Image (cartoon, rainbow, N blue to C red):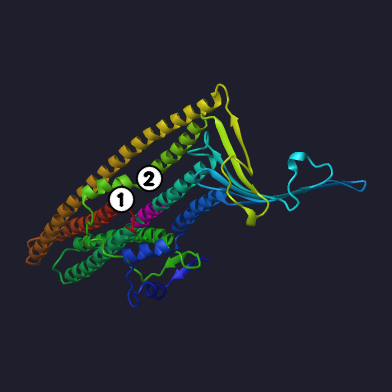
Amino acid sequence: MRKLLIIVILLYSQGLLGQELLTYENYLEWVRSYHPVAKLGDVNLRFGDQTLRASRGAFDPYVYADMERKRFKDTDYFDKREAGIVVPTWGGVELKGLVEQNTGSFLNAERTVPPDGLIAAGASVNIGQGLFIDKRRAALRQAQIYRDATKAERDQILNNLYLDATDAYWTWASDYNKLKILEEGVKLAEQRFIMVKESYELGDLPAIDTVEAYTQVMDRIYRFQNAQINFFRSTQLINTFLWDEEEEPMDLASGIFPEDVLEALVFDYSKESLREYILQHPELQLKDFDIASTEVERRYKAELLKPVLKVNYNFLTENFNQMTVSPFLENNYKMGFTFGMPLFLRRERGELGLTKAKLEFKNYERDLKLLQLKTKLESEIYNFETVEDQLKVYFNNVNGLQRLLDGEMMRFEIGESSLFLINAREVSLFNAQVTLNELAAKRKTAYAKMLNAAGLGFDE
């Protein structure tokens, strides 16, 4: 069941106790705090954080223990025990330490160690393939890029949510003002009908004037009823953006009203700053992150063209107290190396070529996206400036129509005009006021669209 957003509850939480006005700023803060889509954007960040955490796990120290024993017909064939730790590093070097203890009548000679066991400490180093980048480092770097990408995705989700919420709010505000304008028109028409009816009863006006005044009342009631329907719809749309702390949807109480759409709008950003900021647009950042991730893949695939050459070296000692560093490759050591390389490298060269093609493709996509964003921004800037000019023109138009109506009323009072002309002037004024109200709402929505096209949101 949807909850009713009581005036006291909503406005008290916003620090507006005793008022019935739901300001645009407080409305967006409420949306940002509790709307499921806003929370979805925050959850999206956890994807990046946990992916990065999992990738860092490839560099976690690894502890192992291995034991194997064989006894047959009262004979100890062998008893092999080994425990150690492996520590991968960002530089591609694996540090190793182990303790080995082996006994038995049929033990392989190379596994023979002192009675108290043997301690080894050393490292494995890739000096060929994997020297500059390997699978673990590539995965970690891509996870870091993905974490940054989730922030851009969150920003894009929030920016789109703010734009939708803004459009809904100013549509609601426009419908509210239109309702008030048409309500005033109904009252004036009813008052005029009563006045005309009284004048007819006194013999000052013909009966046809009462019919005309009555039809005006009916026409304005009809328009007012349509405005009520539109206001109800826009209120229901506003309700879809309002949720409480318990993640339950809420309804606006009937006494809450929006800001006046005719109030002045502060334009905080210059066109030049918007054009510069577009380079930080979340959609463009996502393209950049995708390219960066593909570049890491290209580096890794290029590394696979190198031969595998891995060197292992360990210092050996019977116990830690006797550990001394002997001259390199002279005594108390164990070493080896591994070498391998395909003769034709067709798979490696094919995968590298494919990655290069993907990288070139993504760069073209990025250039196209930048052009599209710039074009959209210029269109929204032009749209906002045009609506600004239209609004100024219509302010003057409404003022002029108001003066014409006032003049017609004066002429009517001295008998030089008719009810038909007054109604015509009044209808023109109401229509112009409705248009002015719609333009004012369109201007504020156009402003939000312009900021959204530049990649800016309510938080900025």
Q: Under tag 1, what secondary structure?
A: helix
Tell me which amino acid carries mark 1: Lys
Query: Which of the two residues, 334 or 59, is positioned nearer the viewer here?
Result: 334
Instruction: For residue 447, say whether it is visible.
Output: yes
Report x, y in % for residue 427.
20, 57
Q: How many marks?
A: 2
Above or below for 47 versus 6:
above
Report x, y in % for residue 350.
51, 26
Tell me which amino acid carries mark 2: Gln
Crowd rating for badge 1 (residues with CA inside 10 Å; few <14, some 14–19, many 20+): many
Question: In this rendering, would 77 be left or right of 255?
Answer: right
Query: Magenta stretch containing residue 393, yes or no?
Result: no
Measured Cα–Cα span from mark 2 to mark 1: 19 Å
Report x, y in % for residue 36.
47, 59
Report x, y in % for residue 231.
35, 60
Specify start and end residues of the magenta stretch as a single range: 157-166
Residue occupying image coordinates x 48% and y 64%: 249
Residue occupying image coordinates x 19% and y 55%: 428
Crowd rating for badge 2 (residues with CA inside 10 Å; few <14, some 14–19, many 20+): some
Which quadrant of the figure contains the C terminus?
bottom left
The residue at which mark 2 appears reads as: 285
Residue occupying image coordinates x 34% and y 55%: 457
